[in-house]
Amino acid sequence: MGYPNIILQMLSYTDTIVNSAATEAVLCLNCIDKNKFPASTEIPSTRRLMKKDISLSFFRNNRVSAVRKISQFVTEIGPKAFDDIMDKTVNQRSKVMGSHGGVRPIGSSIMMGSPKSAFKPFTRVGPKSGSSRDDRTIFVTFSRGYPISENELRNFFNMNYGECVESIYMQEVSPYAQALFALVVFRSKETMGFTLESMDDEGKVRLKINGKHARARKYFPKMIQ
């Protein structure tokens, strides 16, 4: 977000200021995650810590970039940097909360955060479960006359579920023709499950990508001959 060396700054301040800044950090994350900002945008402790003029307005104006960077951190950097802390936290909270806590073990992975979070899923993949690409793939169909590009599709899922897309295969069409479907392969089977949470009776999920409607369902090889 353009404010490096914050740790060095924190070392020179009292616990009171640091704790206040931590509270404001949680406020910032909640605002970015839910895209709902309070009337007052002041975060004085953070401004003092940064030694720069910063408020919640900054995070509102840079929300897309913030979600992308935070998602990248929690999916790629966090698990490596805080591996021991994560294990300890999961063990402690799973004993207290069982399957109802925000941190829960699922198979060989650890999922953190709410399924509705913009930063989801916070996943540390353990030993490979042997799931095939087909087990991690969804079939997405587009409305005729409302083309959706590969980049739009990738950005939609990565923005909503973290850096989760492994690959995308668009329908092959002639130049200037519209692709009417695509296959989206996710990095984990759990992420695919999140995308299909709101399935209707036909096993389909309605999506709205940049104002354009699409539908998604679990992929089966027989769908494309």
Image (cartoon, rainbow, N blue to C red):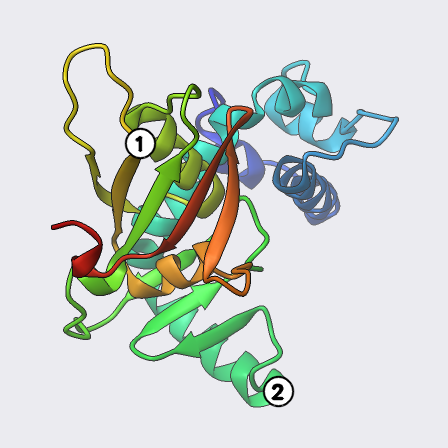
Of tags 1 and 2, the one toward the viewer is: 1
Q: Is residue 199 above or below residue 185?
A: below
Q: Nearer the viewer, residue 156 or 84?
A: 156
Q: Nearer the viewer, residue 21 or 218?
A: 218
Q: Is residue 197 visible?
A: yes
Residue carrying label 1: 180
Horizontal arrangement in the rendering, residue 170 relative to residue 217 (left or right): left
Q: Percent position (x, y) of residue 211?
A: 56, 24
Tell me which numbered mark, 1 or 2, is placed earlier along the sequence: 2
Q: Are marks 1 and 2 in contact (CB under 8 Å)?
A: no
Q: Percent position (x, y) of residue 15?
A: 69, 48
Residue at position x 32%, y 54% from top? Answer: 81
Q: Is residue 89 above or below residue 54?
A: below
- Give, as a three-letter code, the residue at label 1: Leu
Badge 2: residue crowd in 10 Å (few <14, some 14–19, many ≥20): few
Horizontal arrangement in the rendering, residue 17 relative to residue 61 (left or right): right
- Give, as a three-letter code, the residue at label 2: Val
The label shown at residue 96 is 2
Horizontal arrangement in the rendering, residue 101 relative to residue 219 (left or right): right
Q: Percent position (x, y) of residue 48?
A: 70, 25
Q: Is residue 164 visible?
A: no
Badge 1: residue crowd in 10 Å (few <14, some 14–19, many ≥20): some
Q: Which residue appears farthest toward the top when viewing the image?
A: 176
Q: Where is residue 36, by image quadrant?
A: top right
Residue at position x 29%, y 77% from top? Answer: 108
**Element carrying mark 2:** helix
